[in-house]
Amino acid sequence: MQLKIMPKKKHLSAGRAPLMLFLCQMISALEVPLDLVQPPTITQQSPKDYIIDPRENIVIQCEAKGKPSPSFSWTRNGTHFDIDKDPLVTMKPGSGTLTINIMSEGKAETYEGVYQCTARNERGAAISNNIVIRPSRSPLWTKEKLEPIILRNGQSLVLPCRPPIGLPPPIIFWMDNSFQRLPQSERVSQGLNGDLYFSNVLPEDTREDYICYARFNHTQTIQQKQPISVKVISVDELNDTIAANLSDTEFYGAKSHRQRPPTFLTPDGNTSRKEELRGNVLSLECIAEGLPTPIIYWIKEDGTLPINRTFYRNFKKTLQIVQVTEADSGNYQCIAKNALGAIHHTISVTVKAAPYWIIAPQNLVLSPEEDGTLICRANGNPKPRISWLSNGVPIEIAPDDPSRKIDGDTIIFSKVQERSSAVYQCNASNEYGYLLANAFVNVLAEPPRILTSANTLYQVIANRPALLDCAFFGSPLPTIEWFKGAKGSALREDIYVLHENGTLEIPVAQKDSTGTYTCVARNKLGMANNDVHLEIKDPTRIIKQPEYAVVQRGSTVSFECKVKHDHTLIPTVMWLKDHGELPNDGRFTVDKDRLVVADVNDDDGGTYTCVANTTLDNVSASAVLSVVAPTPTPAPIYDVPNPPFDLELTDQLDRSVQLSWTPGDDNNSPITKFIIEYEDAMHEPGLWHHQTEVPGTQTTAQLKLSPYVNYSFRVMAENNLGRSLPSEASEQYLTKAAEPDKNPTAVEGLGSEPDNLVITWKPLNGFESNGPGLQYKVSWRQKDGDDEWTSVVVANVSKYIVSGTPTFVPYLIKVQALNDAGFAPEPAAVMGHSGEDLPMVAPGNVRVNVVNSTLAEVHWDPVPLKSIRGHLQGYRIYYWKAQSSLTRNRRHIEKKILTFQGSKTHGMLPGLEPFSHYTLNVRVVNGKGEGPASPDKVFNTPEGVPSAPSSLKIVNPTLDSLTLEWEPPSHPNGILTEYTLKYQPINSTHELGPLVDLKIPANKTRWILKNLNFSTRYKFYFYAQTAAGSGIQITEEAITTVDEAGILPPDVGAGKAMASRQVDIATQGWFIGLMCAVALLILILLIVCFIRRNKGGKYPVKEKEDAHADPEIQPMKEDDGTFGEYSDAEDHKPLKKGSRTPSDRTVKKEDSDDSLVDYGEGVNGQFNEDGSFIGQYSGKKEKEPAEGNESSEAPSPVNAMNSFV
């Protein structure tokens, strides 16, 4: 049989009787194989007191097993419940579970009552508990008119709650209109009845929204009482308010602020009584008033409060004892005390008990004509009454069975027959409750069967116990015999032990124990047997152990380890050093039976262990290696101290121990201090930690310890030369376990998904665990909600994921450590958030203010915080240039993005292109990503000044004309209105001539300048204009030719052409004569000037300049920008070779350093398209930069002539 086996063993006597076990008929927790006929057994049922949600279908559970499969029926309020007549009630097929469909129609109140399920087959009937069905109720508060409460500062106050009576009772809490819990303290607290008690009031207690809430958890509803208004006023305020009605002595005398001794607000009187049921939580409450605020203390008269079951709540105003027992009955005293006195109240506690089992009846399997008993023994206060039922019918009126006899709490069966099979119910009841247990009597005639697998192989090392299993079943109960060998007789030697469950134990297995063992189960109906096999293996032994060795530094040492083992087992041999792995060093080599250490140094000293393992056993042997100096010298040794030795632990307490040691040789340098280290062999073996330091004159130390640590200590000595090697480790000392002293750190709550909360923490290490079974109690609740804490206990991990959370809700989180000894201190709550999701709403009311042609300012309205669904990161603007205002068919370009951090509601868009068509939208950004985009907003940038013309070429030079060709600006930034061309001659001394200014239509890309001086260098300034102003200028220089013969084709480089022409002219006779005449004329002019100057007069040129001042050559002023001389520092230098100007006189935008934005128009006259002059020089002259690319030609007579043109 499969039995609940008691730990007791049965030994054979020393005699020769066969080894045979007759098991007792009183077997508990009997399980009949499911393929055999048996009465019904209830396996699942609804709770006795079943409160249902009236908004959901009612499900009443009733599951049972049996063979044949049982049928089910129900009673309601003691009468048969015909489910076929009620269309709302259905029974689950193959089950007795009822489903009442009240969601479609019907009311829950209709189905209130007491229900009982019966499972029946041909062998009997089992019944369920009485299941009381009641719908939950959450009634409204009765309407009442609440007058404002006015009282003096320092008075006591009780605000009544009086919640409506619900099912189950509601949870009470006080909040204000903003749904914020009212703060509570030793002065202000909520009582067990829900009332709010003030030991004394203060002015800050004044408010108009003291609201009592009742939360009905079953229906998830909250009811609210009308707000209560409280006003706390001083004596002076009270005088002004009620002086006409009361005298000073009646109400508002000086004593309103006086201190007073405590008195109890609850309970009343000096004594009271409290009754509680065994196993419940006993809650005792005392709330006192007084000034200053009283403190509450609790004691138990003639006894002590139970440790580990006593808790204080509500600022010690409530005493709770969990799992209360009859021993907790007695008188409990609460004491309220302040500076002016004390008062006490005695509560007499009586613990009653609903019935609880001493011995519950167990299923009984009997064979025909056998005897047996059913015992039903229960206790309670008052003593419960025992009654029996048979197949659900009181046994007094049940069919008579001559084989049974009732004797109080016991039914005695004698010579049962198959008809005696039935299910008996034992009911133990008193005024506080009842217990109901089903136990069947199953009369079977069943031959034995062996339940252990056949031919199971057991392998055991010699001289160790061997256990051979033989689980069995049969009715009548079989006898068990064990045989060894195919033809062996029953085991008769007293060295065997047979257990009640059929297991054979060989306490000391020997080689001759090897063989096949047969378990035989017999009863009068037959026999069953099963063979198992036992193999005895030779133990693994180390026949050549490593030996202690002393070697000099630099030498080689070897340790030998020869292993003998059972030939059928394969051993593995490994070497350890100081109980850890060998160093990862090539000097250590392991052969088959040998460890070799070459070039030994001081660090190699220690304990070397050889470990041999097989699948069944392991064995080890160790040896110590000591390393010494090669050649000791007779000179005095000045060295670090030798290690201390002879460590001893005394005065061993839970949290401290005394360590003493003997110092080693100080090697001629006094020891200054000792360093003590510890190893935790349980949690961090092999790792040593600093414990403390003591002076060198001290050889003992009192060490503080932590719970549940397997300590070993070692000591090192230190002198002026250094620190010694560690001493040998002390004996180990395991401290007792205790609850953790601390909780995990770095607690965080961040969601990884929109519907979860990932709680992480830094776990405690093994040393901090303080005991076995380290776990963590993870608690969480919504910060702004009214839910209670939800808690779960997890293993020693660092993360827990809460699923099904609302998106981005603040949570309060606590992680508390606990172990088998108890809980760590209550941790502080930290705040986290559940997972973020993408924002739901786009920013609204997007406005664009165009500041200028390249800058715009964007404004928008912030999105509601609830719609962000995450941490606000900022707002992001997407903008792009859809198409030009000038050219509407351009393709869209890549979008640009600007992010503005935080809660900003405006931002600037720089770097826009003038005269362009832009589109933008705004999105809010959180930690998850971007929200939806706002509707696109379109805006246009105004015109700006254009860029420089893309190129400028000067071609086809003649005696009096030059042809200019150019390409429009690459970025017109608007509609071009015209081009401006300014030019002026440059003489050989780099002085600038008069500046000519002309306007050219915007649609032109070629212009011919005529009526120019021959063989003259000109500098040109060229730029475009829009309605916004002048753009960046481009400059160029060119020279007209001397005669027509010297003109080169346009594709010949200007520089080279001019050099060629100058050489030809200089060799002609007419040119030489001309130059001589010019030189003579200059000489005459210089003489005249010199004479006139000496006379103090002005030479004619100066007079002309003074009389007709040309604005073109006036010094430039910063305020009007007029031009002076061609005086740029670079232009005073001769033209340099290697100018960046290309030979075709083309100047690209990037080659010009000039900008037209600094300049305006300078000449009012204009030219015709053919270059003829039609106006006069006049108007304001603006300075043009004289910088430019110089020609590489050398000085010549032509240049000399040009300086006087």
Image (spheres, grey):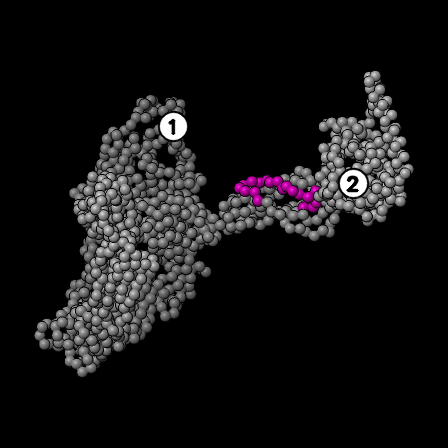
Which residue reaches farthest bottom?
A: 487
Disc 1: CA contacts within 10 A as few (<14), some (14-19) or many (>=20): some
Is residue 145 in view?
no
Query: Which mark is drawn over residue 233?
Result: 1
Please state the horizontal and vertical placement of residue 278, each as a whole percent of the image: 23, 52
Q: Picture quarter containing residue 722?
A: top left
Residue 1044 in sight from this viewpoint:
yes
Residue 570 percent location from the top left of the image: 28, 70
Q: Position of residue 501 (x, y in %)?
A: 20, 70
Work out whether residue 1160 or residue 570 is closer to the camera in this orientation and state it: 570
Count of picture labels: 2
User: Going by the image, does 603 lie left or right of 790?
Assistant: left
Mark seen at residue 590: none
Q: Earlier in the sequence, mark 1 or mark 2?
A: 1
Q: Secondary structure at mark 1?
A: strand
Q: Position of residue 534 (x, y in %)?
A: 22, 74
Q: Residue at x 87, y 34 (%)?
A: 1075
Residue located 43% across and 46% down the image? 832
In the image, 968 versus 519, the foreground residue is 968
**In the rendered view, would you say 885 is above or below 614?**
above
445 vs 843, left or right, is left
Q: Which is more foreground, mark 1 or mark 2?
A: 2
Kind of residue sitting beneath label 2 = Glu
User: Which quadrant of the figure contains the N terminus?
Assistant: bottom left
Q: Is residue 6 magenta?
A: no
Q: Which residue lies under the disc numbered 2? A: 1193
The quadrant where residue 1182 appears? top right
Instruction: Give the magenta-colored segment's residue range.
Output: 899-918
